[in-house]
């Protein structure tokens, strides 16, 4: 049979194919192609990972600063979103805004409601839906939350001048608009 290479036809069947010799020129063309593709996507890959890592690290930093503040990071995230938006979202809308799956969010909302942090009201336009609102209980913790956030961002932005920070914010807002995000 000589030189053969097995090629997968389906998950259960294989057939034999003769091996092809690769010329040095073909190998060089593939290397150049791989390098050009890698270079082309370097910025996109790096930006994506940077955004992901920064978000993850900000979350960890915030969590370390709020350890003594009664609630979990997820619970604070939900309350923060309700406060930021004025509340009144359905569980589905809140799941979309916080990027928390509906089932875990439901459990989080149950715990927050039991603790008096939120209330759920029937939607006046849709009998099947309920709207979620933060209670005034959060007000007591706002100074501590603000201090935690200020400390987190002070650490994050250390070594940057005020003009650089303003420029960074403006550029990030432009990226957000490019992706269809609303103005804050």
Image (cartoon, rainbow, N blue to C red):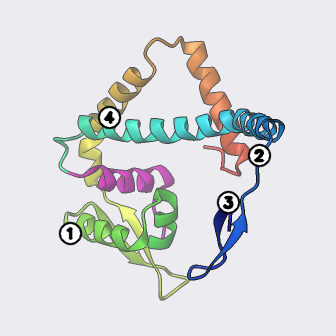
Q: Which residue is mark 1?
A: 114
Q: Earlier in the sequence, mark 3 or mark 4?
A: 3
Give the mark toward the camera: 1 or 4.
4
**Magenta-colored span:** 71-90
Q: Disc 4, disc 2: CB below 8 Å?
A: no
Q: Which residue is mark 3?
A: 3
Q: Disc 1, disc 2: CB below 8 Å?
A: no
Q: Does 129 appear above or below 57?
A: below
Give the mark toward the camera: 3 or 1.
3
Q: Earlier in the sequence, mark 1 or mark 4?
A: 4
Q: Which residue is mark 4?
A: 61
Q: Disc 1, disc 4: CB below 8 Å?
A: no
Of residues 60 and 26, the one drawn nearer to the viewer in this rendering? 26
Residue 119 coordinates in the image, percent (x, y): 32, 69
Which disc is residue 176 wearing?
A: none
Give the mark toward the camera: 3 or 4.
3
Disc 3/disc 1 C-alpha distance (Å): 71 Å
Q: Reply yes or no: does residue 1 show up in magenta.
A: no
SS class, disc 1: helix
């Amino acid at each position: 049979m000589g030189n053969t290479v097995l090629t997968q036809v389906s998950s259960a069947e294989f057939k034999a194919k003769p091996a092809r010799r690769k010329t040095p020129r073909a190998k060089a063309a593939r290397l150049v192609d791989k390098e050009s593709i890698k270079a082309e996507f370097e910025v996109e890959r790096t930006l994506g990972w940077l955004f992901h890592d920064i978000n993850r690290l900000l979350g960890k930093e915030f969590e370390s600063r709020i350890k003594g503040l009664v609630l979990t990071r997820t619970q604070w995230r939900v309350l923060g979103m309700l406060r930021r938006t004025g509340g009144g979202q359905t569980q589905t809308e809140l799941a979309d805004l916080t990027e928390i799956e509906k089932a875990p969010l439901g459990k989080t909302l149950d715990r927050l409601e039991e603790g008096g942090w939120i209330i759920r009201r029937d939607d006046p336009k849709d009998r099947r839906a309920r709207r979620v609102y933060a209670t005034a209980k959060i007000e007591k913790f706002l100074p501590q939350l603000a201090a935690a956030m200020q400390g987190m961002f002070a650490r994050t932005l250390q070594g940057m001048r005020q003009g650089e920070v303003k420029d960074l914010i403006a550029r990030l807002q432009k990226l957000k608009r490019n992706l269809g995000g609303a103005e804050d």
